[in-house]
Amino acid sequence: MNNEKSVISARNLDLTFQTNDGPVHALKDVNLEINAGDFVSFIGPSGCGKTTFLRVMADLEQPTGGTVTVNGVSPEEARKSRAYGYVFQAAGLYPWRTIGGNIRLPLEIMGISKAEQTKRVERVLELVDLAGFERKFPWQLSGGMQQRASIARALSFDADILLMDEPFGALDEIVRDHLNEQLLKLWARTEKTIAFVTHSIPEAVYLSTKIVVMSPRPGRITDVIESPLPKDRPLDIRDTPAFLEIAHRVREGLRAGHSDD
């Protein structure tokens, strides 16, 4: 569609780490456009550069070649303007702060008024289905609830982009399914642009409007799959022929990436 607005753009992106054992080529010649409102999953073997690519978007790693823009500016400028929220693999909540206190932390750093902080904490806890848990401490919550609190913290400053680095990878399958459903509902309600790293083919296919398949290091994009699935997806859509067909294509893309090596 011509009216789509590109919010993240990578052109000929390369990243090489210098190590004592010589250079490590993490990303090579990566080209990608992510449009406003997309839910894009990155999938590939361990060490293929999925997280590195996310970290480049977030200005946590610097490319050695090519360019990346976020909202039309450099990742550094996007970071300074708080254009995105970042959700890490571990919830990363401070155990001595309540859930509300953890969510307030970035807002305190930003100098947002106490009254506005209170409003935002209430709103994001509602969004992640944790209303009423503001005074609990992280250790009083299950792993899945802690991850939802971590997502609430990333949503608190109301950025249009959410970068998520395998946030459900350590959770059991039942909890993960539940959080996948909740994340889709959250995405539908907020209309944010989401970039999501995963190792799970079913998770990538279930969540995404676009699936980016990456090769072993140096990470290259071997396939970009536009999902034909409807935005409203019950969990049992995973048993449909359309879903299984996309999953098969992802698997083929992963296989092709290995055989190119």
Image: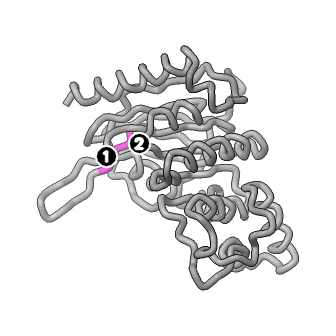
The residue tagged 1 is: 46
Q: In this rendering, is residue 144 above or below 177?
A: below
Q: Position of residue 85 (x, y in %)?
A: 62, 58
Residue in the picture at 72% in, 26% down? 3
Q: Residue type at mark 2?
A: His
Q: Report the predominant secondary structure element of the magenta stretch.
A: strand
SS of the residue under disc 1:
loop
Q: Position of residue 87 (x, y in %)?
A: 56, 58
Q: Position of residue 21 (x, y in %)?
A: 12, 60
- Label 1: few (<14), some or many (≥20) within 10 Å? few
Query: On the picture, is 23 further left or further right than 69?
Result: left
Q: In this rendering, is residue 140 above or below 214?
A: below
How far is disc 1 from disc 2 in space, using C-alphas? 8 Å
The residue tagged 2 is: 199
State the extent of the magenta-drawn residues as a range. Answer: 11-15
Q: Quadrant of the C terminus?
A: top left
* 229 is within the stretch colored magenta: no
Query: Closer to the N terminus: mark 1 or mark 2?
Result: 1
Q: Residue type at mark 1?
A: Ser
Which residue is situated farthest in the top direction here?
A: 241
SS of the residue under disc 2:
loop
Q: Is residue 77 visible?
A: no
Residue in the picture at 24% in, 47% down? 25
Given contact means CB atoms under 8 Å apart, are the residues at marks 1 and 2 in contact?
Answer: yes
Q: Quadrant of the N terminus?
A: top right
Q: Is residue 17 visible?
A: yes
- Label 2: few (<14), some or many (≥20) within 10 Å? some
Q: How is the image coloured?
A: one colour
Q: Position of residue 228 (x, y in %)?
A: 61, 19
Q: In this rendering, is residue 72 above or below 135?
A: above
